[in-house]
Amino acid sequence: MALNTSPTTMSRICMYTPSAEGGMAQYAWELLHALAAARPDHRFELVSGSDLEPQFKSAAYTVSAVLPPLRHRNEFRCRATWVASRLAHYPRREWAFLRWLKRRPDIDAVHFQEWTPWLAAPQIRRIQRMGKKVFFTVHNVVPHKYPLGVPKALMNRWIRNACLACDGLFVHTDPLAAQLSASLGEPHPPIQVVPHGVWTVRDNANGPTMRDRLSWKKLLFFGSIRRNKGLDVLLRAAEHLPGYQITIAGEPHEQQYYEEEILPLIAWLRTAGVSIDLRPRFTPDDQIPSLFAQHSAVMLPYTRDFVAQSGVIFMALAHEMPVVASEAGGLRDLFNNYRIGEIFHDHTPESLAAAVKSLHAAPDPAALLREIRQARQRFSWKAAANATLAGYARAGEGRSAANDCAAQTTPAL
């Protein structure tokens, strides 16, 4: 596909991130700051929802909060009206972006952090017909969940077609790059590995010492509640962890799993005397520092169905908090380089409980803290920005060298 732009002229890039809050908004904020610092001769711009929260705006780059806001589910009295609102929202949002983009001939490229799978491929082609390159960060090769009533094969085809239409793709780990390459087949756009950075902690208040943390025996499960996050395994491990407390802070994203498995387990454990603090809702960003400061370790009992990179682990590193994790989603590779907690191999309650006990019996908490700080330095947003810029440059190479389209990484600087 011949386009009018080239790597040498691609200096004005907009990042499309409709999310006005949460992890995706934070990701765009972090990456755009790093990109602006790495290439002050370029122009970077964020395109987001009109309800973008103030902490995700910046003077370091242009912010165009022009997209229609997504109404929250709790604003609707019944599921039918909520579904109808969602179905109308996404086409309206994409057309709003296209109208905005048509008025911006100065934009050389669009970098999608999010998209609507069933609308993405035709939208990408429209953007390319404007003479602009298109990139996408594939945060999850396989969706966390599929919309009700949409066959998996159809959703996967939408995603595959959209990815193949792009000029370049980004993933966070080598295993994800291999999985994406296999799912797309040859030839496909260049795939660049961009390491996920450690979140910036904006609250500079001093946290607890590592020794104090471990003495509390307070475990935190943070993030959306889905089956592939393995919360049920953590709860089943609680009977093997006398004296430990568990906090669950996350919004249920699979209601049947939450109501039929999680809630009964919590009720049974509470009856048995286990202390469980359930907070089944989105945690505002300004509450996260105090939440993390009150716990010993973050629990990541993800199942083998979880193949994405975990943003929660980088949040834990940002707050200098150890983790107990399974080997899913590339977590093993991180643990192979840095002992930032404990990893368990058998995905069983007994194995998880043993890892928790091993962490809290750490003979040298200071050494654990040193490893966490080394990991923080390694996974910098500067490295993410350099790898992203390398991916932009590779887009000019085309697709003829199919074997060269496999993952490439940029070393951390």
Image: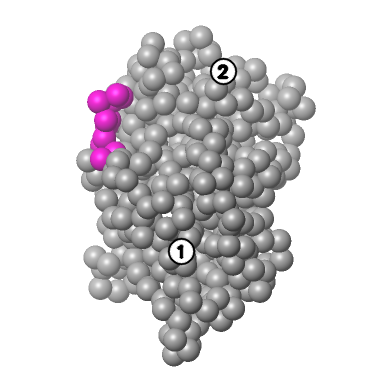
Amino acid type at mark 2: Ala
Q: Is residue 342 visible?
A: yes
56 in magenta: yes
Q: Are marks 1 and 2 in contact (CB under 8 Å)?
A: no
- Between 275 and 198, the one lying in front of the other is 275
Q: Which residues are magenta?
A: 55-65
Left or right: 295, with 154 as reference point: left
Left or right: 343, with 198 as reference point: right
Q: Name the residue rendered at 44%, 18% in the picture.
A: 38
Image position, residue 412 (x, y; %): 57, 26
Q: Sort mark 1 into few (<14), some (14-19) or many (20+) by Cα contacts within 10 Å.
A: few
Q: Residue furthest bottom?
A: 271
Q: Is residue 129 visible?
A: no
Dividing the picture into quarters, in which one does residue 194 lie? top right
Q: Quadrant of the C terminus?
A: top right
Q: Sort mark 2 into few (<14), some (14-19) or many (20+) by Cα contacts within 10 Å.
A: some
Left or right: 297, with 32 as reference point: right
- Between 8 and 265, the one lying in front of the other is 265
Q: Residue furthest front?
A: 363
The circle on residue 393 is 2
Q: Quadrant of the N terminus?
A: top right
Image position, residue 398 (x, y; %): 65, 20
Q: Name the residue rendered at 50%, 39% in the picture.
A: 373
Image position, residue 290 (x, y; %): 31, 55
Q: Name the residue rendered at 44%, 90% in the picture.
A: 271
Q: Residue furthest right?
A: 403
Element assignment for label 2: helix
Q: Which residue is mark 1?
A: 215
Element assignment for label 1: helix
Amino acid type at mark 1: Ser
